[in-house]
Image (spheres, helix red, strand yellow):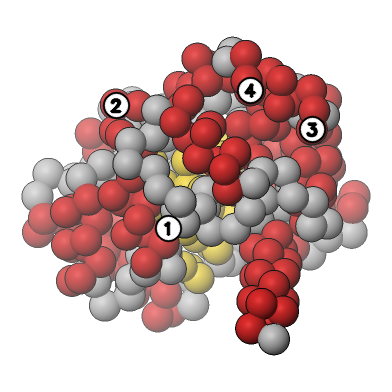
Amino acid sequence: FLAALTFLLHLLLAKASSLSTSLKYGTAWKKEATSDLVYNAVKAGFRHIDTACQPKHYNEAGVGEGWTKAAQELGLSRENISLQTKFTSLNGQDPNRIPYDKDAPLAERVRQSLEKSLENLQTDYIDSLVMHGMENSWEDNFIVWRVFESFVDEGRVRQIGISNFYEADAVKYLFENARIKPAVVQNRFYKDSGYDTEIRSFCRDNGIEYQSFWTLGANRHFLRNAEVADFCREKQLTPETFMYAFVMAIGITPLDGTTNQDHMVEDMALLQRLRDGEVLFTTEELTKFAGILGIPNFEMGEEEEEL
């Protein structure tokens, strides 16, 4: 009886995990092509879009144009699209294209940034608002965070999070001192940070979504591995869809910034396979590939479910 109950629980958890699995369309560096690429991504099936109020690296208004055009053609409502954007501090902005008054107090800069994001994205609320990086002091970090919390209180932002926090102690300190806890940590997924092993563990333990960027670009050595290639042939995956499937299997939500329409379709086909309940990895295979990638201290049980 206990074995049967355990098996049933596994199936239920796997189904819940598959339903929450997502790829977020990343829009950095796309410049004047942003609108068309976001339009193509939504038409291909993407429903989660990541951007930032940072003209230096993002065309946030192009994101607004792209998602609204696609949604209109597909008959989608605003509720069908998840929009995530970021507040970027002065040191991350192009001094000639700052999207807020650089001389205003920090709290006011955060408020002006949100207003610009709402305008650019053609919406009256943001699903997820993220600090693009740490400020120069903890005092300033909490000035930004308290304004973020006020946005949630007002109903203009549904959840808040952080990005480019690579010290586990910093993530924990913000979490412990926040009235509204971060729902997202978005970091570069690469060897130099030890693949954020401690941060990801903290996120799992506290119900925080860990999002990865540079997931493909920083790990080309992994995608060229012979055992990975054999697995891809067996499971009918490309190296890119393999990598996305692998990181999702260990509890990561990857950003997907492809500009190729065929790849968009392939990536959405992968997502459908996972949501339909297909099991791509055993726990043993996850452990093996984690070792090949170079994730330190990877242990059985780190993954949320077999996927």
Q: Marks 2/4: CA distance?
A: 22 Å
Disc 3: which residue: 235
Q: Nearer the viewer, mark 1 or mark 4?
A: 4
Disc 2: which residue: 192
Q: Is residue 215 left or right of residue 122?
A: left
Q: Residue at x 89, y 53 (%)?
A: 74
Q: Nearer the viewer, mark 2 or mark 3?
A: 3
Q: Quadrant of residue 255?
A: top right
Q: Earlier in the sequence, mark 4 or mark 3?
A: 4
Q: Amino acid at mark 3?
A: Lys
Disc 4: which residue: 228
Q: Is residue 177 visible?
A: yes
Q: Quadrant of residue 256?
A: top right
Proximity of marks 2 and 3: CB atoms separated by less than 8 Å: no
Q: Earlier in the sequence, mark 1 or mark 3?
A: 1
- Under circle 2, the secondary element is helix
**Is 165 drawn above or below residue 275 in the view shown?**
above
Q: Count numbered badges in the picture.
A: 4
Q: Residue at x 83, y 57 (%)?
A: 276
- Under circle 1, the secondary element is strand
Q: Residue at x 53, y 58 (%)?
A: 304
Q: Residues within 10 Å of mark 4 (few under 14, many from 20)?
A: some
Q: Is residue 290 left or right of residue 198?
A: right
**Is 292 drawn above or below residue 281 in the view shown?**
above
- Under circle 3, the secondary element is helix
Q: Marks 4/3: CA distance?
A: 10 Å
How far across and down, in percent of the image, does residue 15 sit?
73, 67
Proximity of marks 4 and 3: CB atoms separated by less than 8 Å: no
Disc 1: which residue: 184
